[in-house]
Image (tube, helix red, strand yellow):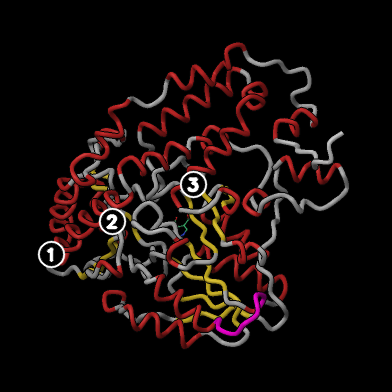
Amino acid sequence: MSDEPRRLDRRDFLVRGGLLAGATTLAGAGGYVAGRELGRSEGDAQAAGSEAGKTDTRQFLLDPAYVNLTTFLLASHPRVVREAIERHRRGLDAGTALYLRQAEPMFEDEARDAAADYLGTAREQVALTDSTTMGLGLTYARLSLEPGDEVVTTEHDFYATHEPLRLRAQLDGATVRRIRLYEEPENASVDAIAAAVSGALRPRTRALAVTWVHSSSGVKLPLRKISAAVAQANRGRSDGERILLCVDGVHGFGAEDASPVDLGVDVFSSGCHKWLFGPRGTGLVWAAPHAWERLAPTIPTFDGSAYIAWIEGRPPSETPAGALNTPGGFHSFEHRWALKEAFEFHRDIGRDKVAARTRALANRMKEGLANIQGVTVKTPMDESLSAGLVCCDVPRPAREVVDRLREEHNVVASVTPYATEYLRFGPSIANQEADVDRALEAVAAVVA
Ligand SMILES: Cc1ncc(COP(=O)(O)O)c(C=O)c1O
């Protein structure tokens, strides 16, 4: 007998669990092969990547009767993602247990590898989740904090950051302090934000919880500068005392040509179903190895190595952090596995081209709005402080404007879901210049 620790993969786990007992291999790999044949056509990547990031908007099934500038809320699936979902759905519907048995570990690894490749990191550091909110909830629930330690967050963050921190404070009395990084978003400055962060970090601060692109205003935080301020405050601290920079990255992920890994972030949570145009109901948490050390799972993983540890009556010490922190249970696998195609979609176009295209459309939107009387653009014009989201103040209630844009002009916009409501657009690679121009004409007509 070998001395090698026994490896139990997910398939063994399912077999042991009795689910697949007696299962036989599907002839010819069944739905998997059939699925591969359904795969993307060669032309798609080229079409999607042509003309300096101008995407082939035919990838999307958006209703042409409307101008939709809200795909950032929840993605419309591009064709390659739709086809991948359909392929997996067919396989699962044809024989769920058999499809799982033959394909599941491989597809999960492929999805995680594609995510790791996009982030520029290793598979072992990527946990898969269902959303940004799930990732933030899991992170802030288990972040290691001693009595008297504090988490600093900001007034600009979304409910998905504030609420898990409130729940954490309720659970064990952890201190949560909110700071302000700017007064009016349109006047935000990189240096003032970095200075506000530096001035807020105290000896007992253990985490800084921020959002990459504020969905309240469209302000993009200068993460590199912030991580430098955090690094400065961390000088001389032990590992357990280091301040972790924890980021809700959802409105930058898939819109910006930068990876949190390179920006000096420690813990990054994002949905993959907004700007990334991944399958609805998918997300991830990436953390640097030193940061994973300070986190712990809440929901047990279904990773095979953890399962065998349980069988053998020991903790899952061999399970990599990413897998360990991936909530277990069965999932909507056809969506999760199609993450691979979503990351490939971006890779094939080019992350730089996606970002350039998003930015060009956002700039067109901002410049056009600034020329409409009575409209104040709240999102900074400066590209170092903005991404794809565009928010503005209008001389009527934002909700009324959103309703009239939709009802009278077939333009779909949104209202910022915060105490201060702004009119909000998110032109993306699913849009063309003409969409932005139609929206601008409609806003001018509604606010006139
Ligand atoms: C900043 C921010 N974070 C998180 C979310 C929620 O994202 P998810 O659906 O991935 O949880 C939103 C909006 O939907 C948001 O604006």
**Image quarter hosting the N terminus:** top right
Name the residue type under label 2: Phe
Q: Nearer the viewer, mark 2 or mark 3?
A: 3
Q: Position of residue 337 (x, y in %)?
A: 53, 35
Residue designated by label 3 = 115
- Whether 251 is drawn above or below 266: the answer is above
Left or right of residue 448, residue 385 in this image: right
Residue 15 is at least partly visible in this image:
yes
Q: Give the mark toward the camera: 1 or 2.
A: 2
Q: Nearer the viewer, mark 1 or mark 3?
A: 3
Mark 1 near ligand 1 (CB under 8 Å)?
A: no
Q: Earlier in the sequence, mark 1 or mark 3?
A: 3
Position of residue 112 measured from the top left corner of the image (x, y, whole percent): 54, 44
Q: Position of residue 204 (x, y in %)?
A: 63, 84
Q: Amino acid at mark 1?
A: Ile
Which residue is found at the position 39% from the left and 44% from the top?
Answer: 277
Give whichever of discs 2 and 3 has the lower sequence position.
3
Q: Residues within 10 Å of mark 3 (few under 14, many from 20)?
A: many
The residue at which mark 2 appears reads as 425
Q: Please report whichever mark, 1 or 2, sits nearer to the chain's N-terminal start.
A: 1
The reply to whether callout 2 and callout 3 are in contact (CB within 8 Å) is no
The answer to whether mark 1 and mark 2 are in CB contact below 8 A is no
Mark-to-mark CA distance, 2 and 3: 27 Å
Q: Secondary structure at mark 3?
A: helix
Q: Which residues are magenta?
A: 234-240
Q: Which mark is residue 372?
A: 1
Q: Does the residue tagged 3 have its C-beta within 8 Å of any atom of ligand 1?
A: no
Q: Could you classify mark 1 by the number of other residues whose Cα lies within 10 Å: few (under 14), some (14-19), or many (20 or more)?
A: some
Per the model, the C-alpha gap separating discs 1 and 3 is 41 Å
